[in-house]
Structures are given as structure tokens and as C-alpha cells.
Image: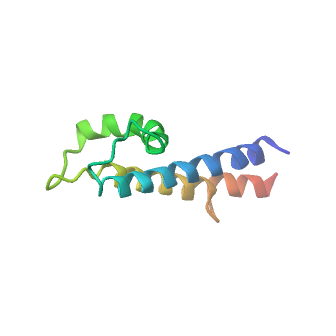
Amino acid sequence: MTGVNLTVWILGPILGLMTFLFIFRIILTWYPQVDLNRLPFNLIAWPTEPFLVPLRKLVPPIGGVDITPIIWVGIFSLVREILLGQQGILTMLSRVS
């Protein structure tokens, strides 16, 4: 297994998992009474919060709605497509190897 294939094998699930967690984070914003410090919700909040905090300083809530999880879903989806998509950088490199 080459280094590129190993990177694709590791990076693909990580980017997919982060997108999945941020989608769940968006769903959790519909339920403000949910305590993000209790199980199972902290399993979603813990890995996503470090990404959300700095972006919240740059992007204020719009109409009282925190849109930062939506932005991160877009970022992770874009990065995954650029690197691992059908014509992604790492996909093309793995075909050359």
C-alpha cells in the first residue's frame, strides 16, 4: 500500500465522519433544550466545538441562528471532494502510482 493510498484510506473516513457530526450538530441546534454536556450529545459536541468557536467569532448568528455548523459541512464536503472525489487530487495521484 503506497503512502497516497494510505492517506486516502485514513482521510476519507475522517472527513466523512466530521461531515456527519456537523450534520448532527445542525440537527441539535433545532433543540436548544438539549444539554450538550451529557451523553450521547457530548459525543457530537466534543469533536465539533473546537471548529465552531473560532468561526463564531467571525460569523455572527443570522436572525438568532448559528450558521457555523452549516459552513463547516460545506468546508469539509469541499475538501473531501477536492482531495478524494472522482477527479480529486489524491484520487488522481493514487491512479498514477
In the foreground, 55 or 95: 55
Left/right of residue 6 with respect to residue 54 in the rendered view: right
On screen, residue 51 above or below 29: above
The residue depicted at 40 percent of the width and 34 percent of the height is 50
In the foreground, 5 or 72: 72
On screen, residue 96 above or below 47: below
The residue depicted at 47 percent of the width and 41 percent of the height is 39
State the residue lying farthest toward the bottom. Answer: 86
The residue depicted at 63 percent of the width and 56 percent of the height is 84
Left/right of residue 62 with respect to residue 51 in the rendered view: left
Left/right of residue 8 with respect to residue 48 in the rendered view: right
Residue 23, horizontal then vertical, whole percent: 43, 56
Q: How is the image coloured?
A: rainbow
In the foreground, 49 or 4: 49
State the residue lying farthest toward the right. Answer: 1
Residue 3, horizontal then vertical, whole percent: 78, 40
Q: Quadrant of residue 81?
A: bottom right
Q: Quadrant of the N terminus?
A: top right
In the foreground, 7 or 92: 7
Residue 40, horizontal then vertical, whole percent: 48, 44
The residue depicted at 36 percent of the width and 50 percent of the height is 69
Residue 82, horizontal then vertical, whole percent: 55, 56
Q: How many marks?
A: 0
